[in-house]
Amino acid sequence: MPTPASGTPPRALRWAVAGSVIVMIAAGGLFYYASQLAAAKRKVHGNEVTVTIHPHSCEPNALTVPAGFNSFRIVNASERAVEWEILDGVLVVEERENIAPGLSQVINATLTPGDYAITCGLLSNPRGTLHVTPTAASEASARARPALVAFIGPLSEFRVYLSSQGNALTKAVDALSQAIAAGDLAQAQALYVPAREAYQRLAPAAQRLAELDNSINARADYFEKREQDPGFIGFHRLEYGLFEQRSTQGLTPIAQQLLANSVLLKQQLLAQSLPPEQLVSIVARTLHNLADTRASSGEEERYSHIDLNGFAANLQVTHKVVDLLRPLLNKNNADLLRTIDDASTALDAELDGLKTAQGFPTYDTVSAGQRQQISYKAKALADALDGIDPALGLSGL
């Protein structure tokens, strides 16, 4: 007769049960921690305004908020990645790009009284309105604005930088346009890289010019018919043709339009005054975007995968801005300057460590761990840059 089964579970089974209990306890602890963290975040952003982006509209599409610090939670209820922007005329005040379907992101903005426009997902969607009402604090802040004499030199030198980089962009795009017109695919692919780098050295300032920058730099996601949409022009349309379709066919008029827009970009950058409080915020915003989305997704250069070239170019303009403000920072907050320099060196080293004798590799060969390190170090630098305006008395203006 078979031997009756023992009432004592086998040792392996006992260990398995114990392990399951430990895992459940750990999972419960993590869930509790996550819920507490989420609750803390909700408390911090208790006054945030929620805007839901639908396929062809935003809800609400007319907002009124008080002047000063405001948080907006942008919920993407559409089926594609979207962006949301606050515009002051033609200038971008604040934005968040590449909000994934079904997810939300928070945009923090310090706003002065006045009327603004807001974009809503697709570039063809109707714009909304944002009315910012004055407060006692905003009026006091305006009266307390620091003397701007100390910023004349840095702003003037940055204007010279924009002019030289604008020249570099038009020269690089002209060479690219000629290669496309000649039907030389290999040459056009090679020349796309320096043209794109030249743009990325201007990107923080260029992204203030909403309409023009959309013509130059908008990705296919922001158009109704994506890559087939007639409004999809500019760098990424050329990138799609050269690297995805591997052809120059039909790209000549697009390249010529990009060249004309590059000339116009330089003109408009030099025509617009840049307030001192935006000199740092434009590069900090670019690095926050790099850390939050571009480093992990690789969406910026999805056909050519030359993302690392763009990251390095963004870092170059960041170096320029920090160097322009270095004397003021060294006087007002030397500790902050050291933190910025350390964070900048760390991101430089991370990018340089990926270089080969042939230059940067394509981003589709960069591991998830390496992308995460780029994201961490870009965020550390962006967070440090956020401290500059308060250190120089420019915060809240």
Image (spheres, rainbow, N blue to C red):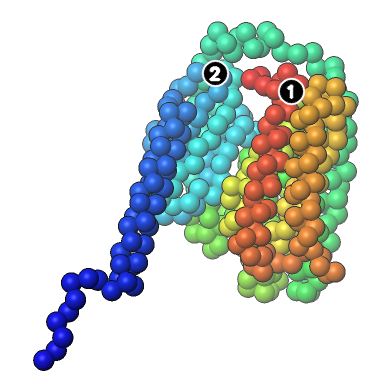
**What residue is drawn where x is 32% and y is 57%?**
21
Q: Dividing the picture into quarters, in which one does residue 147 lie?
A: top right
- Quadrant assignment for the N terminus: bottom left
Identified by mark 2, the residue type is Ala
* Residue at 75%, 42% in the rendered image: 343
Rendered position, 87 above or below 201: above
Front position in the image: 136 or 330: 330
Residue 235 in the image: state x and y as whole percent. Answer: 69, 57
Query: Which is more N-terminal, label 2 or label 1?
Result: 2
What residue does disc 2 label? 67
Q: Quick check: can you spot residue 124? A: no
Tell me the SS state at disc 2. loop
What residue is drawn where x is 54% and y is 49%? 98
Furthest-left residue in this view: 1
Which quadrant would the C terminus be assigned to in this image?
A: top right
| Position in image of residue 182 (x %, y %) | 80, 72
Rendered location of residue 270, percent (x, y): 80, 34
Name the element at disc 1: helix
Category of crowding for the residue at label 1, using alpha-carbon neighbours closer than 10 angstroms: few (below 14), some (14–19), many (at least 20): some
Instruction: Decide if residue 36 is on the left or right side of residue 195.
Output: left
Disc on res. 391: 1
The quarter of the picture where residue 46 lies is: top left
In space, the residues marked 1 and 2 are separated at their CA atoms by 21 Å
In x, y percent, where is residue 335?
78, 29
